[in-house]
Amino acid sequence: MITGNFSASLNEATIREYQKSLGLPPSRITVPERNTVFCTVERVEPERYFSFRWIPYGIDAEADPTNEPTTLVEFHLEQTAEGTLLTIVESGFDTVPEHRRERAFRMNQGGWSGQAENIKKYVERK
C-alpha cells in the first residue's frame, strides 16, 4: 500500500480568508499531526493513469476522519498532437455528509485549480 503523509504547515487565518473569498462561511480547521496519512493510492498505470482516495477538505474541523467517506481523485494522461493532456477528476462528493458537502467541494475545487497551475509552471520550466 502506498500512502501520502501530511508534512505542511497551515495558516488558519489564511484559510478562513480564502473561504470568505469563495462565499463560504469561515470554518475551523483541524491541523493534522505531522506525517498523518491523508491519502491512499488506488491505482497506478505508468504514463497513463494515477488515482488515490482521500477525505475531501479533510482539515475541516467538522470532518470525522474515522467515519468520513473518501472521494476518488484521478489523473488521466493522454498523448495528443500538441503533447500531453492532463485531466484531473475528483468524484464521490455525493457521499460527503450534507453539512460539509459544499464546503468540501468548493475548497477542493480551489485547491485543484492551484495544483493545476503548479503542474503547468513545472512543465513549462522543462
Image (spheres, rainbow, N blue to C red):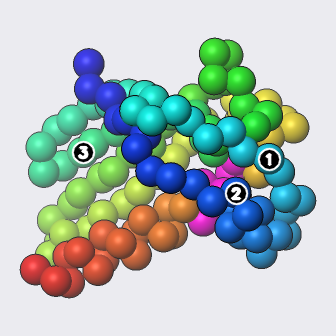
Query: Left of 14 or right of it: where is 72?
Result: left
In magenta segment, residue 107:
yes
Tell me if mark 2 has few (under 14), some (14-19) or many (20+) residues whose alpha carbon lies within 10 angstroms of its own.
Answer: some
Residue at image coords 40%, 32%: 35
What distance separates the C-alpha of mark 2 from that of mark 1? 8 Å
Q: Nearer the viewer, mark 1 or mark 3?
A: 1
Q: Mark 3 highlights which residue?
A: 49
Q: Mark 2 highlights which residue?
A: 12
Residue 28: mark in rendering: 1
Q: Position of residue 8 (x, y in %)?
A: 44, 50
In magenta segment, residue 88:
no
For the stretch drawn in magenta, what is the main secondary structure?
helix
* Residue 109 in which image quadrant: bottom right
Magenta-tinted stretch: 104-110
The kind of residue on which mark 1 rests is: Arg
Whether residues under marks 2 and 1 lie with C-beta atoms below 8 angstroms apart, the answer is yes
Residue at image coords 42%, 65%: 115
